[in-house]
């Protein structure tokens, strides 16, 4: 928000403190706009107000260029005064930053000599204002014409709001009936246990299959490359036995053993036909012994 002043007032002559009754000291103030650019009001009549907490006192002076100078021709009560300058419709300054303090002097003034702030002549004030302002007559004809036109305007058409009010009343009753109707009972379901189970499943770590170390196992291809098949092994063993028999001469040794140095071994058939069995011999021995035991 812009808080800058519309007008500004800067003291260029005199001080801010003056003794009561000092009518010779000169005060000078420069008139500026919001950008602190001097406002040229040369020849215009300015009214200077000294405003206190109780009331105010005014002086008149002529503006020279953008500056106004004046003296205090009256004995003012001891007080702190706010300085305002009125000229050509302007009021300087827009804030309350410029003050002049009237302090007690050694001279004791009688009450009759001191200006009573509340009794400054209103007639003088008006005369001073009119002296510095040109008052133009105001033509109120256009405004009177507009007022008369408004007064002559026909009255607005009235509408029967009865049917609409009746419908609004019916709608109101319907709404009240709906509001008074009990709300349907809604069965609430406690999803807490189910949510906990779902949450537990979501937080459960994913299962991983145990890693299998296959370094100690052989593949089928490796097994066939390392070991012989049964058929190959059987053929190899038969060949090895045959070759070993030939190498050691076992077949010839067996044939020699069977010849038994010319005393060939008997076959079972030969033994059964050439010799009696041990059992038959034992029976025969028992019969001989029995016969020998018979007395003669």
Image (tube, rainbow, N blue to C red):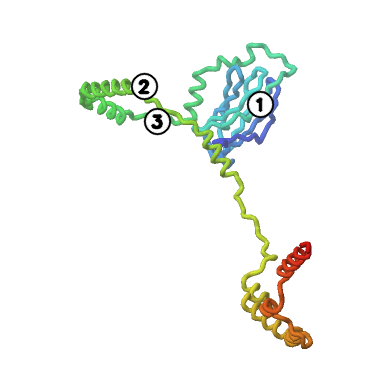
Q: Residue at x 62, y 73 (%)?
A: 221
Question: Label 1's element?
Answer: strand
**Residue 172: x percent and y percent?**
30, 22
Residue 201, above or below 88: below
Q: Earlier in the sequence, mark 1 or mark 3?
A: 1
What crowding class fits label 1: few (fewer than 14 Cα within 10 Å), some (14-19), or many (20 or more)?
some
Picture mark count: 3
Q: Nearer the viewer, residue 29 or 37?
A: 37
The residue furthest front is 296
Residue 98, above or below 53: below
Q: Are marks 3 and 2 in contact (CB under 8 Å)?
A: no
Q: Earlier in the sequence, mark 3 or mark 2?
A: 3
Q: Is residue 243 visible?
A: yes
Q: Residue at x 50, y 18 (%)?
A: 122
Q: Residue at x 23, y 23 (%)?
A: 161
What number is the disc on residue 100? 1
What distance separates the C-alpha of mark 1 from that of mark 3?
A: 35 Å
Which is more foreground, mark 3 or mark 2?
2
Question: Label 3's element?
Answer: loop
- Asked if residue 179 lies left or right of residue 11, the reply is left
**Residue 218: x percent and y percent?**
66, 69
Residue 34, above or below 80: below
- The image quadrant where one finds the C terminus is bottom right
The residue beneath circle 3 is 136
Q: Are marks 1 and 3 in contact (CB under 8 Å)?
A: no
The residue beneath circle 2 is 182
Q: Earlier in the sequence, mark 2 or mark 1?
A: 1
- Asked if residue 242 lies left or right of residue 146, the reply is right
Question: Label 2's element?
Answer: loop
What distance separates the C-alpha of mark 2 from that of mark 1?
A: 79 Å
């Amino acid at each position: 928000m812009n808080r800058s002043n519309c007008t500004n007032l800067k003291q260029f002559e005199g001080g801010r403190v003056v003794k009561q009754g000092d009518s010779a000291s000169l005060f000078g103030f420069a008139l500026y706009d919001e950008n602190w650019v001097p406002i040229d009001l040369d020849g215009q009549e300015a009214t200077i107000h000294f405003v206190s907490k109780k009331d105010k006192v005014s002086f008149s002076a002529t503006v020279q260029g953008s500056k106004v100078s004046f003296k205090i021709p009256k004995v003012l009560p001891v007080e702190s005064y706010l300085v305002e300058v009125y000229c050509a419709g302007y009021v300087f300054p827009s804030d309350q930053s410029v003050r002049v303090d009237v302090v007690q002097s050694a001279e004791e003034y009688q009450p009759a000599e001191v200006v009573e702030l509340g009794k400054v002549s209103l007639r003088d004030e008006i005369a001073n204002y009119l002296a510095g302002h040109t008052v133009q007559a105001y033509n109120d004809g256009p405004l009177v014409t507009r007022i008369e036109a408004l007064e002559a305007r026909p009255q607005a058409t009235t509408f029967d709001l009865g049917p609409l009010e009746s419908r609004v009343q019916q709608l109101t009753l319907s709404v009240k009936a709906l509001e008074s109707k009990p709300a349907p009972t809604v069965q609430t379901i406690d999803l807490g246990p189910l949510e906990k189970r779902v949450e537990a499943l979501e937080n459960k770590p994913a299962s991983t299959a145990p890693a299998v170390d296959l370094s100690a196992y052989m593949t089928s291809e490796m097994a066939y490359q390392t070991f012989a098949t049964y058929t190959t092994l059987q053929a190899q063993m038969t060949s090895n036995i045959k070759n070993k028999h030939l190498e050691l001469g076992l077949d010839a040794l067996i044939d020699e053993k069977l010849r038994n140095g010319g005393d060939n071994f008997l076959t079972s058939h030969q033994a059964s036909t050439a010799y009696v069995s041990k059992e038959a011999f034992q029976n025969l021995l028992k019969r001989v012994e029995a016969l020998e035991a018979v007395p003669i």
